[in-house]
Image (cartoon, rainbow, N blue to C red):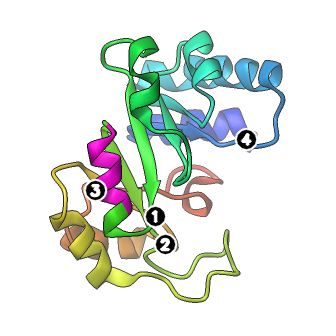
Amino acid sequence: MSLLDCIEANAASGCERIQIREKDMPAREMFELVRAAIARARPHGAAVLVNSRVDVALAAGAEGVHFPTRAPSPAEFEAILPPGFLVGMSTHTIGEIREAERCGADFVVFGPVYRTASKPWLTRPLGLDMLRKACTSTALPVAALGGVSPERAQECAGAGAAAIAGISMFQSGPA
């Protein structure tokens, strides 16, 4: 299944947000990919967010941006972001969640909750207890990330996660 077919299938199955996370892609190619992803996802009600690249997200008409942990503060972009533009941030600690909240993020992604094949060098996942603490430490919605499978999604929801995020779980289409 092509990437765009996968995006459309996941959006059609109810995924609310699709993140374009092509860290090494040149801006023009990323712009074209984001535009194509929007064309496939938006008819199904899914929002497209771009990893780190506010410029590409705005130019392509995406619904938001997602920042890694050590990115500039979302507050630095506040003046150029349109109303309703979503800002997500990756977090790994309660302190990072609090910082994301202080800086104006709309939601956080927290993890890795479990061991994950996409980051095999991480030997110590944070676990469900830490996810629970993360969820109760903020008013922001928290998405659980890292090793989350369809079977584990209920555990994450039970710990307070508002959503789940993933790479491998969604790569071949709906979970």
Could you classify mark 3 by the number of other residues whose Cα lies within 10 Å: few (under 14), some (14-19), or many (20 or more)? some
Q: Closer to the camera: disc 3 or disc 2?
A: 3
Query: Circle 1 is placed at which residue position?
Result: 145
Q: Amino acid under label 3?
A: Arg
Numbered range of the magenta stretch: 96-103
Q: Are marks 2 and 1 in contact (CB under 8 Å)?
A: yes
Q: Are marks 3 and 4 in contact (CB under 8 Å)?
A: no
Q: Earlier in the sequence, mark 3 or mark 2?
A: 3
Q: Earlier in the sequence, mark 2 or mark 4?
A: 4
Q: Amino acid under label 2?
A: Pro
Location of residue 91 by image quarter: bottom left
Query: Circle 4 is placed at which residue position?
Result: 22
Query: Circle 3 is placed at which residue position?
Result: 98
- Circle 2: element type: loop
* Location of residue 121 with respect to 66 vertically, above or below: below
Query: Circle 2 is placed at which residue position?
Result: 112
Q: Amino acid under label 4?
A: Glu
